[in-house]
Image (cartoon, rainbow, N blue to C red):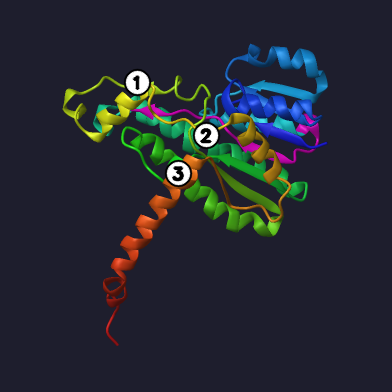
């Protein structure tokens, strides 16, 4: 039996992961925004499920909840940073408060959960951290500039962190799902639409979502199982792409960046001080 700490378990991947883990007999420390969100699971699984309310943008509360989870449960094997949301609009359309909320939730919130957990993981001799990112942590789509900001940012943090904590027996895996049938799409935050962007790629993507023609290929159950399975692989893989669309778009983005870099090779090498 393993013990997991998972943020954002009210719905979507977090809820499904919690359900699957409890069903197989693992313990879960689950955080939610609304206290009653997991009442049905608590009734069924009792002591296997530990629940706390948490807004990950509240740094003091993050530390308090993480400390209490370790104190109450004694040992936590895997931390899953899943809480987050997406701001869906052209860059110019977003409000200042919306931008701040996006960054506070997806970057700072995730960082602070990890920072709160690290002393405990070190003290117990190791553990795993799964950081839920997105295919949008490597590829980009118009109308998601602030969402991509946070996913690219948290991937840079975790990529660096993995090098720092590997000697401490702490493994980091960045989870990069493609589009899935979860509450993610319906829960996206929007901003007032500016007509100037209607006939641009931002407007095209907006219409794809409105018309239901944006391809959603990911199976939530398979993705959740892959997240569980990856914790058995040692050493921990740094990234895990999940979904045909994730693989396709991320590979295209990486190949394009590599081609552009290679095209600048001679210039890059020439920028050196003369002896």
Q: Earlier in the sequence, mark 2 or mark 1?
A: 2
Which residues are the magenta region? Answer: 71-88
Q: Is residue 138 something one can see in this rendering? A: no
Tell me if residue 229 comes above or below residue 60 in the rendering. Answer: below
**Cα gap from disc 3 to disc 1, whole angstroms:** 25 Å
Helix, strand or loop for disc 1:
helix
Q: Is residue 121 something one can see in this rendering? A: yes
Helix, strand or loop for disc 2:
helix
- Residue at image coords 29%, 80%: 273
Residue at the extreme left of the image, as rendered: 196
Q: Residues within 10 Å of mark 3 (few under 14, many from 20)?
A: many
Kindly check if marks 3 and 2 are in contact, taking CB atoms under 8 A apart as contact.
no
**Cα gap from disc 3 to disc 2, whole angstroms:** 16 Å
Which quarter of the image is occupied by the C terminus?
A: bottom left
Give the percent coordinates (x, y) of residue 173. 61, 47
Q: Residues within 10 Å of mark 1 (few under 14, many from 20)?
A: few
Quarter of the figure with residue 6: top right
The residue that disc 2 covers is 109
The residue that disc 3 covers is 137
Kindly check if marks 2 and 1 are in contact, taking CB atoms under 8 A apart as contact.
no
Which quarter of the image is occupied by the N terminus?
A: top right
Between 70 and 213, the residue placed more toward the observer is 213
Tell me if residue 21 comes above or below residue 135 in the rendering. Answer: above
**Cα gap from disc 2 to disc 1, whole angstroms:** 33 Å
Give the percent coordinates (x, y) of residue 57. 51, 29
- Please state the total of marks drawn on the protein image: 3
In the image, taking residue 155 as reference, residue 172 lies left or right, namely right
In the image, taking residue 72 as reference, residue 56 lies left or right, namely left
The residue that disc 1 covers is 211
Is 59 covered by the magenta stretch? no
């Amino acid at each position: 039996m393993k013990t997991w700490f998972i943020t954002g378990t009210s719905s979507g991947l977090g809820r499904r992961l919690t359900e699957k883990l409890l069903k197989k007999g693992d313990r879960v420390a689950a955080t939610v925004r609304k206290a009653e969100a997991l009442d049905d699971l608590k009734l069924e699984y009792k002591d296997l499920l530990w629940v706390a309310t948490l807004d990950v943008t509240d740094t003091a509360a993050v530390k308090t909840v993480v400390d209490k989870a370790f104190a109450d449960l004694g040992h936590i094997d895997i931390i899953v940073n899943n809480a987050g949301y997406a701001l869906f609009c052209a860059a110019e359309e977003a409000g200042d408060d919306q931008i701040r909320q996006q960054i506070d939730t997806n970057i700072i919130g995730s960082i602070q959960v990890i920072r709160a957990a690290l002393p405990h993981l070190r003290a117990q001799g190791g553990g795993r951290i799964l950081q839920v990112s997105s295919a949008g942590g490597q590829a980009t789509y118009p109308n998601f500039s602030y969402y991509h900001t946070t996913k690219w940012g948290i991937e840079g943090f975790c990529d660096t962190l993995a090098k720092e904590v590997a000697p401490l027996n702490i493994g980091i895996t960045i989870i990069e799902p493609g589009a899935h049938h979860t509450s993610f799409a319906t829960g996206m935050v929007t901003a007032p639409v500016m007509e100037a962007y209607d006939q641009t790629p931002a407007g095209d993507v907006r219409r794809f979502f409105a018309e239901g023609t944006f391809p959603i290929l990911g199976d939530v159950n398979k993705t959740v199982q892959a997240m569980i399975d990856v914790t058995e692989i040692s050493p921990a893989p740094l990234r895990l792409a999940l979904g045909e669309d994730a693989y396709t778009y991320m590979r295209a983005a990486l190949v394009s960046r590599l081609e552009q870099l290679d095209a600048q090779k001679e210039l890059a090498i020439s920028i050196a001080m003369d002896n």
